[in-house]
Amino acid sequence: MLVQSFLPMSITPSSSAKGNLFVVSAPSGAGKSSLIKALLEQYSTDNHPLQVSVSHTTRAPRPGEKDGVHYHFVTVDAFKALVEEDGFFEWAEVFGKYYGTSKQAIADTLERGIDVFLDIDWQGARQVKAQLPDAHTVFILPPSVAELERRLTGRGQDSAEVIAGRMAEAVSEMSHVDEFDYVLVNDDFDETLRSFLSIVQAQRQTQAFVKTAHGRLINALLGR
Ligand code: 5GP
């Protein structure tokens, strides 16, 4: 009780603490989207809110995908107009289609103290890191070549040529693994999810983050 009278009213993060930005890349078949989805569903809380950024793309929606939820599905002209207006934080051509993260998609969210996840390719990750060195980049690898092949083979309905093409794309994406801050090998899903969570939580314990989030508490504890 006595201690309480010395402490400021709020010892929860102050409104000046901004969210952290995480960039997550992986070859197709590594489990990236499932890991991000599970992380948000299981670990986003009021004290530590997590959100995924919704990208713009010129590719067509797949069955079950909703505009504004999975992507903002736009025409090539609309995409190019946004590029002209300098509306993208980063953008890239991936497999012949345009993909981009709009500035609007992340700025307000980070300001509000929410951690934001970008599910983007290595080209986008490189652009983000160049503009925001404080962003945390995470690369997810499959556990073996055999497992990657198995995951890319799908239901066995695709030709050997199609599968070989997917493998080549995966190898091309993985050749950038050493540009990333963290690397997760997705062998056991739950274990990988825990490792992913530990990376995310650790960024709230850095000196820089704690100074901003708990500056008043630290001053009070030190009698300043
Ligand atoms: P898909 O078409 O399978 O959803 O995504 C294909 C690739 O594009 C994935 O590697 C995905 O991470 C990447 N991607 C999705 N959105 C963006 C984006 O906004 N920017 C960049 N650079 N890549 C993206």
Image (tube, rainbow, N blue to C red):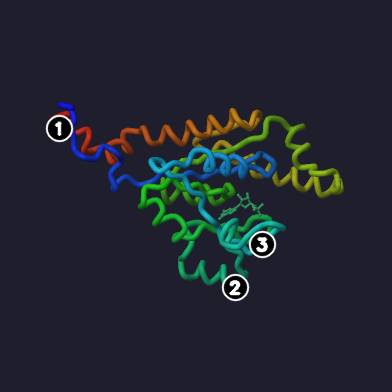
Left or right: 116 in relation to 166: left
Relative to 40, say whether 188 is above or below: above
Q: Amino acid at mark 1?
A: Ser
Q: Amino acid at mark 2?
A: Asp
Residue at mark 3: 59
* Label tally: 3
Q: Label 2 vs label 3: CA separation?
A: 13 Å
Q: Position of residue 120 (x, y in %)?
A: 57, 50
Q: Position of residue 18 (x, y in %)?
A: 35, 47
Observer-side mark, 2 or 3, equals: 3
Left or right: 223 in relation to 205: left
Q: Nearer the viewer, residue 162 or 62?
A: 62
Relative to 13, say whether 65 is above or below: below
Q: Quadrant of residue 153?
A: top right
Q: Are marks 2 and 3 in contact (CB under 8 Å)?
A: no
- Mark 3 close to ligand 1, CB under 8 Å: yes
Q: Are marks 1 and 2 in contact (CB under 8 Å)?
A: no
